[in-house]
Structures are given as C-alpha cells and as structure tokens.
Image (cartoon, helix red, strand yellow):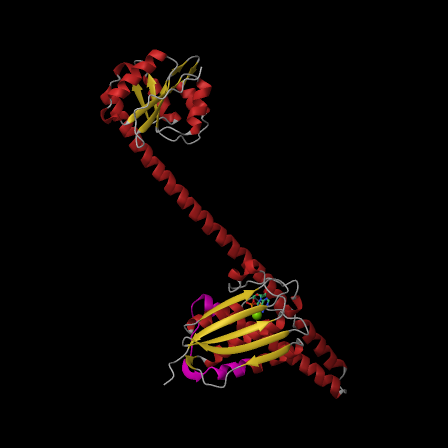
Amino acid sequence: MVKLIPTGGAGPSGLRLLLVDDDSDDYLLTRELVEELPGSRFSLDWVDDFDEAVRAIGRGEHDVYLIDYRLGAKTGLELIAALKGQKCSGPIILLTGQGQFEIDQAAHEAGASDYLEKSALNAVTLERTIRYALKQYAHEAELERKVQERTKELEDANAALRDADRRKDEFLATLAHELRNPLAPIRNALEIQRMATNNPTTLESARQMIERQVRQLVRLIDDLLDASRMTRDKLRLELETLDLIEPLEIAIETSQPLLAQASVTFERHIPAESMRLRGDRVRLAQLFANLLNNAAKYTEAGGRVTLSVEKADGSAVVRVKDTGVGIPPELIPRLFELFAQFNRSLHRSQGGLGIGLALVRRLVQMHGGSISAVSKGLGHGSEFTVKLPMLPAS
Ligand SMILES: Nc1ncnc2c1ncn2[C@@H]1O[C@H](COP(=O)(O)OP(=O)(O)OP(=O)(O)O)[C@@H](O)[C@H]1O
Ligand SMILES: [Mg+2]
C-alpha cells in the first residue's frame, strides 16, 4: 500500500520531491526524468494512496509536491481539498492527462502552483516548472509572512488602544468621584454655618473644614492641569542653580501634615555638604513631595518613611523608602504610567487621580535624571530612587 520510496541522490541541500500517483509505471517514468535533471539536486519519494498522501503532505517533509490528477476513484483536486487549506511545505504541481484544460483553471483555484500535461513532460519542462513554482511559492510565503507580521502589529496597537481607552474610562469615574468627595463636607459645613450663627467655635471649625476641602479640590485640579500639560508636552522648567536641600526642605514641609496624619515615623538622612544642580525649585519640590505623599498614603499607622540622600558618580541620589503596603513586582513596569492606580480599593479614602508618579517621572527626566522603584511585594514596603545629575563642584 504505502510506497514512500526514497530514490536518494540529493545531497543535504537538495530538493525533496513527493510524487502522488497510483500508477507505478508513471512513478518509474517520473523517476527517470528526475534522475535526468541537471545537478542531481533532486530526490523523489512516492506514495500511491490517497489517505497516505494526505498524511505525507501533512508531515511537511518535502519541497515540492507532484500530484497526479487521477488517483483511483478520487482526483488530485480532491486531495488538495482534503488538506483543508493547511499550508503545504512547498508548491503543488498537478499532473494531468492530455487536453484537460478545465482542470488547469480548477487547479489554480484549489491552490496548486502549476499544472503539467504528462504526455508533454520532459526533464527540461519539469525542472523549469519546479524552479518557477518554488520561486512563486517563496514569494507568496514572504508576502504571507509580511501580512502576518503587519496583522500582529495592528492587533498589538489595537490592544494598546483598547487598554488606554479602558483606563481613560476608569479615570473619568475616578475623577468624578474625587471631585465630588469634597462637596459633601463643604455642603455640611455651610449648613452648620447657617444653623450655628452664634457659636464661634463651631463656625470656626466649619470654616476650617471648607478651607481644607477647597485646598484638596485645588490640588486635584492643579494635578489635572499638569497631566494635561504633560500629555501635550507643554511642561516647562524654570531652571536656576540651586542646592538640592532647598527643594527637599520645601517638599518635607509640604508633606509634613500628611505624614503626621498617617501616624508614620519620618526619618531623614541628608548630608550637610552642598549638592548643586540646575533645576526648577518648585517642580523639584513638587516631585519629592509627591513621593513623600505616596509613602504617607500607602503606609499604615505605626510604619516608617525614610528620606535619604547621597552622592554617587556625579549624581545626587534621593531615596524615599516606606514600610507600607508595597507594590506587586509585576505592576512596577506600569507604575509610572498616567492614571495607573493599583490599590484603590485598599486606599479609597486616600483619593488621588493616579497622576503623581507619571508627573514625577516626567519631571525627573526633564532634569536629565532617572527614577526607579523596587518593592518586595504586597505588604513589604516600597522604595523609590531618584538620580539627578549634579553640577561639578568647583
Ligand atoms: N509608596 C507606595 N507604596 C505603595 N503603592 C504605591 C506607592 N506609591 C505609589 N503607589 C501605587 O502607585 C499608584 C500610582 O501612584 P500615583 O502617585 O501616580 O497616583 P495616586 O497616588 O493614586 O494619585 P495622585 O498621586 O495623582 O494623587 C498608586 O495608586 C498606588 O497604587
Ligand atoms: Mg500619588
């Protein structure tokens, strides 16, 4: 039944042909032709059975498939159809009897590369047909590869867009929530003011409440404006020569209330020597305050936040470390993306829009520096390291 008979002959770089033909005389003829082909680069295997042919082609071990149109009760076209559109490892050339021109058309439609009349077959035509079929096949494979590559690129881009779109939706929900949050206490305070017109202590605490909530609203809107400037590339620095300690002190002062409110211990290790750099005082203070605020926000009462500074290779290295909720390592690559927030459910009351770290990274980069984050995972604290190039000491 099965006659996968190798003729041998072809070297390791030779071409393996598979003949599917139910007639052994035709096999012998084809084999003679193949042996005549120049360069003895060809080897010929043979199967005479329809089902075996489907399996042999499926194994993809051959470079060219020569398929006889007449295969017992079935046809070569049926064989091609039985491959169910799976990609063959090489071109298919259909062999037919004389004058079966209608088969030519059908063969092409079925996916065969070419069609040869058996009666007109000789070594020259066979070699030429194989050569052309291989060339065309390689060309099609290359096109196919390019199409697949492009499709993959489009799919990736599409997924990224979907992801960005989803994050924007989530962000809108967060924004609405965050903007609405301060309104309830403000409304309460106004009501209290209306009722308690003659109690100065109550009036004063209501006033303070409104002040706090308005400050929070202003902070949110300032962050939003910064985010919008950042995405439109409109952030600008006001550069001056300064000592790093100056923006650091402002940042510590800014974050002090939040650190105190969080009941965390705050430690600072800042060397006395000066660290001069070109930078924007306000923006540097803002970026360090964002890191300190995060450390306060994402650390439970009783925890510790440490700010340390050192010099290394002409850079100032600022570390903000906390003993807080930590960050799952797999999320760290997305930490500095705009609107990325991971533990909102844990810290809903802490609020925020997911703008802080994106802004921090951009500002650090605009100062020619770099930022990185490490965490041993949830519950194990986080550490942010900012490196800023210093001016040479002279
Ligand atoms: N020190 C930290 N410990 C644990 N998680 C952190 C820490 N800093 C940031 N994160 C996580 O990274 C997310 C992004 O931080 P980012 O500062 O950008 O946004 P936010 O603090 O949620 O809001 P915003 O800073 O805009 O008020 C946070 O929501 C939080 O999940
Ligand atoms: Mg933040």
Q: Residue at x 53, y 83 (%)?
A: 249
Q: Nearer the viewer, residue 150 or 10?
A: 10
Q: Is residue 236 above or below residue 141?
A: below
Q: Residue at x 29, y 33 (%)?
A: 135
Asked whether residue 163 is in view, the answer is yes
Q: Visible in this render: residue 356?
A: no
Place residue 184 in its image quadrant.
bottom right
Up the image or down, 172 lies above or below 364; here it is: above
What is the magenta range? 228-251
Q: Residue 358 placed where, x, y %? A: 50, 67
- The C terminus: image quadrant: bottom left
Q: Is residue 271 left or right of residue 113?
A: right
Give how far across and how far down residue 115 sits, in percent: 31, 22
**Rendered position, 59 above or below 308:** above
234 or 327: nearer the viewer = 327
Query: Which image quadrant shows ligand 2?
Result: bottom right
Residue 213 shown left or right of residue 239 in the figure: right
**For residue 24, what is the image quadrant?**
top left
Q: Position of residue 90 (x, y in %)?
A: 36, 30
